[in-house]
Amino acid sequence: MGTVLFQPLETTRLLLRCVVADDAAATAMIMTPEVSRWLANWPVPFTHEMAVARIEAARDRARRGDALPFTVTDKVKGDLIGWVMIYRSEENPRRGSLGYWVGEKHHCKGYMRELMPIALAAGFDLLDLDAIEAAAQPENAASIAVMKGCGMKPAGEGMVYAPARGRHELCQFYEVQRSPTPA
């Protein structure tokens, strides 16, 4: 399985744990064109070998203290549902970026709204970040609803290079600031 790099997190229905090599097959299987079309860095076909490399890179960043790469699994069945990753900005170590997705058969079940508060809290606490941002294409209403639903505020828009499709795409950016610590 692999060394535990940080403690798992739980919601009512979900377990968020650090990605491990054994997640490669399930990750490759649920990365479909319908999911990939909204993700800049997840091309299709997404092979088992690509999943292994993605997991190794994510775990390396976690070992350095620069990322929290979570697989999202069903607490009862243990099935991999998707990924959530928060990683430290290389330009500003006090800021992080958030990426997330769930497989097609798990869309519209409220999983992201359920897990996002604890994932963001972990990013602020474990990575010691002051702000976390995310981006989505303007047509990705579901992702924008997730960002707004977890308290993210609009932070502008701009072109983002999407290697998965080999082009620049317009994205809307949202961010959330760390809550002030009570005195």
Image (cartoon, rainbow, N blue to C red):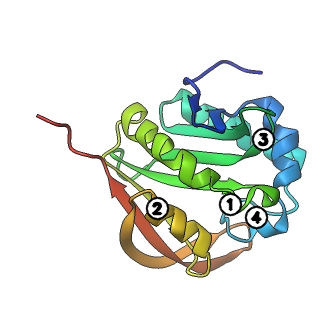
Q: Label 3: which residue?
A: 80
Would you place residue 98 above or below residue 148 in this image?
above
Q: Label 4: which residue?
A: 35
Would you place residue 59 above or below residue 94 in this image?
above
Would you place residue 88 above or below residue 46 in this image?
above
- Per the image, label 4 sits on a secondary structure element best described as helix
Q: Nearer the viewer, mark 2 or mark 1?
A: 2
Disc 2 crowd, CA 10 A, few/some/many (<14, 14-19, 20+): some
- The answer to which quarter of the image holds residue 148 is bottom left
Q: Nearer the viewer, mark 3 or mark 4?
A: 3
Q: Label 1: which residue?
A: 41
Which of pointers 3 and 1 lies earlier in the amino acid sequence?
A: 1
Disc 4 crowd, CA 10 A, few/some/many (<14, 14-19, 20+): some
- The answer to which quarter of the image holds residue 52 is top right
Q: Residue at x 76, y 64 (%)?
A: 35
Q: Nearer the viewer, residue 5 or 180?
A: 180
What amino acid is found at the position of numbered circle 3 in the picture?
Leu
Would you place residue 34 above or below residue 126 in this image?
below
**The C terminus lies in quadrant:** top left
Q: Label 2: which residue?
A: 149
Query: What is the tally of numbered marks visible in this picture?
Result: 4
Q: Nearer the viewer, mark 1 or mark 4?
A: 4
What amino acid is found at the position of numbered circle 1 in the picture?
Asn
